[in-house]
Image (cartoon, coloured by chain):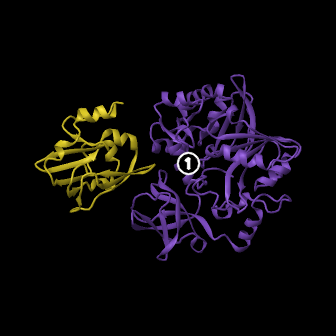
Chain colours: A purple, B yellow
């Protein structure tokens, strides 16, 4: 991840809380973030079995509003924003003209003409500039990242903990829906979303109440097995769920069709979104590469991003993410490989420190407990 | 930090420990190193008979997050490796100075071990 070493790392409003919990802090996308508290494996298992609480305040937030906001969003994002009504959110992507991914993000329709976009921490400035350059009349774009802290509560017990924290002013919402509630007198946006392959919620709140909300969730959740979780387990959880990570499965030289997120691209909407023509050509011809999930077939070191992939004795692509699956106890990974090899049950070889190790492509995801 | 740093061992700047007796050196990683790495999931052991120069990469310890090279603290020939780590890599976390040892070297230059950090110097380095 590119970062300017001369600028001090940004801290979230929860930095002191993390240090009090004994977290190990690392640089991530320009931010000082907790990578782990008790240990990545333990935290991972807590999220799969009970619940975990994540600081995601580093993520960026933009507000897009105005009478033309809907049409404009449809011209810069791949998904069809008309598909969602107020109170709903959708995953979407921003592309370059070549059809490569500038960023992946979530957009929530707060009101008829007001939207909240949640973007990757390391891409906040780049995304804002990219969007600002393309702005049209009757649309306002604001970077409100400093007005929001954010927490993610994930796992099978997340629902029960939510009801203990927000006793009143809470109602049932479904996956990708949102509601607003209150905490310490402040408005909190609650979305039923996440990046773990578990049911769960994300909370967007003013920075001033973030530490209070963090402590309250942990206090209410402790008896149900809820623990604080760092970026280390966030990565192993999302890998098991096969969620793409920007900079790994998604990049300016990888198209959504190659990355396997083509279902979030609307070719039918009237607006010509950036990158549509190239993507349409690629759809017609078939993407040259595809992202596949694989498991190592024999004991080996864990596969890591950047390792070469071979098939039929020839170079076939590259590992984009890899590691040990704490849930399966296997070495797993995602690789971007030539489409000819991109089906389930194909034998691959992963090159680890100049030795090739057998692997097999498998169905995505490795783990996921979300009811659709 | 309350890192365990036994007085009877020698240490490197790169967080290996070495116990030498009669020209045979046992090598592992320190308590500090295993804490920093956290959950070790794989250890790639060196080949027996391999001749290593001091500070040459000798083994690889992989945590959930990343792969880290382990360096030979002194020059010598690999004469034994801890095969228990193949099935139980977490021994590096649980018992870094005993059951989690990684390899043994026949020391090439008997003066080299003495030049490594002692416990006090290693402790001072960690701060």
* Residue B39 placement (x, y as % from top left): 40, 45
Q: Position of residue A124 (x, y in %)?
A: 66, 43
> Foreground: A364 or B15?
B15
Classify residue A11 by image quadrant. Answer: top right
Name the chain letter of the residue that bears numbered label 1. A
Answer above or below: position of A170 versus A45. above
Q: Position of A289 compared to A311: left or right?
A: right
Q: Quadrant of residue A164?
A: top right
Q: Residue at x 26, y 52 (%)?
A: B72
Q: Nearer the viewer, residue B57 or A57?
A: B57
Residue A286: x, y in percent? 68, 72
Mark 1 sits on what residue?
A2
Disc 1 packing (10 Å; few <14; some 14–19; many ≥20): few
Q: Is residue A287 above or below residue A208?
A: below
Q: Nearer the viewer, residue A161 or A237?
A: A237
User: Going by the picture, which residue comes out furthest to the bottom?
Assistant: A312
Which element carries disc 1, helix, strand or loop?
loop
Q: Is residue A106 shown left or right of residue B52?
A: right
As drawn, the residue found furthest toward the top would be: A185
Q: Is residue B95 visible?
A: no
| Residue A279 falls in image quadrant | bottom right
The image shows residue B7 at horizontal and vertical percentages of 20, 34
Left or right of residue A111: residue A359: left
- The answer to whether any part of residue A276 appears in the image is yes
Residue occupying the point 67% across, 60% down: A100
Residue at 22% x, 45% y is B18
Number of labels in the image equals 1
At x 31% / y 47%, what residue is drawn? B91
Query: For the view shown, which residue lies furthest in the front direction?
Result: A6
């Amino acid at each position: 991840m590119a970062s300017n070493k001369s600028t001090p790392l940004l801290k979230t409003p929860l930095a002191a809380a993390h240090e009090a919990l004994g977290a190990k802090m690392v640089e991530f996308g320009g931010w000082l973030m907790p990578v782990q508290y008790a240990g990545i494996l333990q935290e991972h298992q807590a999220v799969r079995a009970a619940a975990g609480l994540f600081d995601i305040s580093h993520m960026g937030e933009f507000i897009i509003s105005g009478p033309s906001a809907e049409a404009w969003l449809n011209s810069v994002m791949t998904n069809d924003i008309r598909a969602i009504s107020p109170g709903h959110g959708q995953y979407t992507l921003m592309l370059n003209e070549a059809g490569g991914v500038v960023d992946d993000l979530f957009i929530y329709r707060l009101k008829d003409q007001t939207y909240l976009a949640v973007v990757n921490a390391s891409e906040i400035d780049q995304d804002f500039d990219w969007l600002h350059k393309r702005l049209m009349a009757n649309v306002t774009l604001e970077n409100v990242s400093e007005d929001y802290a954010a927490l993610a509560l994930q796992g099978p017990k997340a629902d029960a903990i939510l009801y203990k924290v927000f006793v009143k002013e809470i109602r049932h919402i479904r996956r990708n829906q949102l509601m607003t509630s209150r905490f310490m007198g402040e408005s909190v946006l609650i979305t039923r979303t996440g990046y773990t392959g578990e049911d769960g919620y994300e909370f967007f709140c003013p920075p001033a109440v973030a530490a209070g909300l963090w402590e309250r969730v942990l206090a209410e959740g402790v008896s149900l097995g809820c623990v604080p979780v760092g970026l280390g387990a966030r990565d192993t959880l999302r890998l098991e769920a096969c969620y793409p990570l920007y900079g790994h499965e998604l990049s300016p030289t990888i198209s959504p069709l190659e990355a396997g997120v083509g279902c979030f691209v609307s070719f039918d909407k009237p607006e010509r979104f950036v990158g549509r023509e190239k993507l349409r050509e690629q759809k017609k011809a078939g993407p040259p590469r595809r992202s596949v999930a694989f498991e190592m077939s024999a004991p080996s070191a864990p596969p890591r991003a950047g390792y070469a992939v071979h098939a039929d004795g020839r170079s076939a692509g590259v590992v984009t993410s890899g590691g040990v699956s704490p849930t399966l106890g296997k070495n797993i990974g995602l690789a971007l490989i030539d489409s000819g090899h991109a089906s389930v049950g194909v034998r691959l070889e992963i090159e680890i420190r100049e030795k090739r190790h057998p692997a097999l492509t498998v169905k995505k995801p490795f783990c996921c407990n979300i009811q659709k | 930090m309350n890192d365990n740093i036994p007085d009877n061992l020698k240490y490197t700047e790169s967080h290996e420990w070495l116990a030498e007796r009669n020209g045979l050196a046992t090598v592992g990683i320190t308590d500090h190193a295993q804490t920093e790495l956290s959950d070790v999931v794989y250890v790639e052991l060196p080949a027996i008979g391999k001749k290593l120069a001091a500070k040459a990469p000798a083994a690889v310890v992989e945590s959930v997050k990343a792969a880290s090279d382990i360096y030979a603290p002194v020059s010598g020939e690999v004469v034994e490796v801890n095969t228990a780590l193949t099935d139980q890599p977490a021994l590096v976390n649980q018992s870094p100075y005993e059951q989690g040892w990684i390899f043994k070297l026949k020391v090439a230059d008997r003066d080299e071990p003495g030049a490594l950090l002692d416990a006090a110097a290693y402790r001072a380095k960690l701060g």
